[in-house]
Amino acid sequence: MDPVFDTVGDELECYSDGTCRHKAVHSIGCVAKAKFVSSGAGNFTGIFSADADYGFVRLSVGSEPDESSGVLVPGMGIKFLRDGVDSANLVAMY
């Protein structure tokens, strides 16, 4: 799980031998554009400290849903783009 949190940048890295890291977990999902508008009620820092016009929300599942047991393994990611630095990201998954 460390590469998810430790990789710098917004792209899956490629190595000197030409192979690239692939998304092995939660590889199927839906993406939507997002905009964050702060209500001003709170002392938030980081990605929630100010309005953000350019973001993405991604919802995914970790595996095929099991209809017989009703098990679903959800995941969510939020990404806000920033000028001059890597994006700000939040990842949550079961």
Image (tube, rainbow, N blue to C red):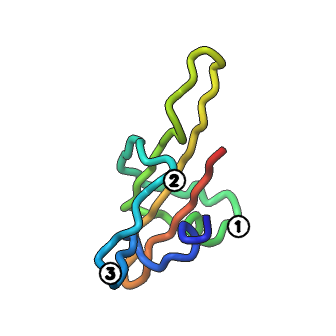
Specify the amino acid type for callout 3: Asp
State how far apart marks 2 and 3 are (Cα).
Answer: 30 Å
The mark nearer the N terminus, 2 or 3, is 3
Mark 3 vs mark 1: in front = 3
Q: Which residue is mark 2?
A: 77
Would you name the residue on which mark 3 appears?
17
Q: Quadrant of residue 4?
A: bottom right
Of all residues shown, which one is farthest toward the right? 43
Foreground pick, 33 / 71: 71
Q: Is residue 93 left or right of residue 87?
A: right
Report the disc number at residue 43: 1
In this view, the residue in front, 57 or 54, is: 57
Q: Is residue 75 above or below residue 35?
A: above
What's the residue type where badge 2 is placed?
Answer: Gly
- x then y, percent, for residue 1: 61, 64
- Camera-nearest residue between 84 and 50: 84
- Structural crowding at the residue carrying mark 1, measured as other residues with C-alpha within 10 Å and reported as few (<14), some (14–19) or many (≥20): few
Q: Residue furthest top?
A: 68
Residue 71 lies in quadrant: top right
Q: Where does the image place residue 82, in percent across and percent down from the top left?
A: 41, 74
Q: Would residue 73 be found to the left or right of residue 35 on screen?
A: right
Give the Cα separation between the discs numbered 3 and 1.
Answer: 46 Å
Confirm or deny contact between disc 3 and disc 1 (CB under 8 A): no
Residue drawn at x 50%, y 56% is 78
Q: For numbered disc 3, what is the local secondary structure?
A: loop
Q: Which one is earlier in the sequence, the residue at label 3 or at label 1? A: 3
Circles 1 and 2: CB distance less than 8 Å?
Answer: no
Which residue corresponds to the image point at 35% horizontal and 76% vertical from the top-left? 14
51 displayed left or right of 5: left
At mark 2, the secondary structure is: strand
